[in-house]
Image (spheres, helix red, strand yellow):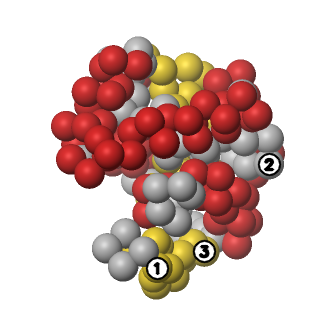
Amino acid sequence: MIILIDGRSGSGKTELATLLAARLGAQVVRLDDVYPGWDGLDAGSAAVPGILSSGRWQRWDWATSQPAEWHSVDPDRALIVEGVGAITRASLPLADHALWVELDGETRKERALARDEYFAAHWDEWAAQEARLIAREDPRSLADSVVDGRAVEAFSLEWTP
């Protein structure tokens, strides 16, 4: 089983992926580990179909700003790919379920900046990349379910894949 979890920064994608992974015994690929830097949203999103078809992905080393080691997913376990840009027209046919996490902009920004102090300097640049990707792909409309970012725990308990 392959599940894609998408939504804008700070919406609750990581929390939902963590909860579902624990419940389903799934492995998680976090696109935060794939994006090649602060201007790499499109590249990270474009990598998702390859991850789903090959089961391999390369980690981006944020400290050195260089590609790092390769990872493989276990084909016998459920897989969750989580991050902005996970749901696109190219990745959707390779997945079993697609979930979009929705939350208001003010709360998202507050959550994201509390989680990562370095994000503040890049928030506007990243948000512009998100807006372009969303305008191009409309991942919310591609998703099977829209999840309230304030209620991901409840959703994870009641959702049946």
Marks 2 and 3: which is nearer the front?
Answer: 2
Numbered badge on residue 110: none
In the rendered image, the vertical position of residue 84 relative to residue 69, given as above or below: above
**Residue 146: quadrant of the picture:** top right
What amino acid type is highlighted by mark number 3?
Arg
- Residue in the picture at 19% in, 37% down: 114
Specify the amino acid type for callout 1. Answer: Gln
Alpha-carbon neighbours of circle 1 within 10 Å: few (<14), some, or many (≥20)?
A: few
Rendered location of residue 29, percent (x, y) = 48, 59
Image-based side of 134 in relation to 150, left or right: right
Q: Mark on residue 56?
A: 3
Which of the marked residues, 1 or 3, is nearer the chain's N terminus?
3
Q: Residue at x 48, y 26 (%)?
A: 101
Task: Please give left or right for residue 124 compared with residue 146 in the image.
Answer: left
Q: Residues within 10 Å of mark 3 (few under 14, many from 20)?
A: some
Of circles 1 and 3, the one toward us is 1
Would you name the residue on which mark 1 appears?
A: 66
Q: Does the rendering let one see residue 152?
A: no
Pick whichever, 57 or 42, lies toward us.
Answer: 42
Identify whether 124 is placed above or below 144: below
Cα separation between marks 1 and 3: 17 Å
Q: Looking at the picture, how far across and down is residue 91, in whole percent?
A: 73, 49
- Give the mark nearer the N terminus: 2 vs 3: 3
On the image, the x and y values in percent for residue 104 come to 41, 15
Residue at image mark 2: 90
Q: Amino acid at mark 2?
A: Ala
Task: Using the numbered discs, state the Cα–Cα distance from disc 1 to disc 2 in whole angstroms.
Answer: 26 Å
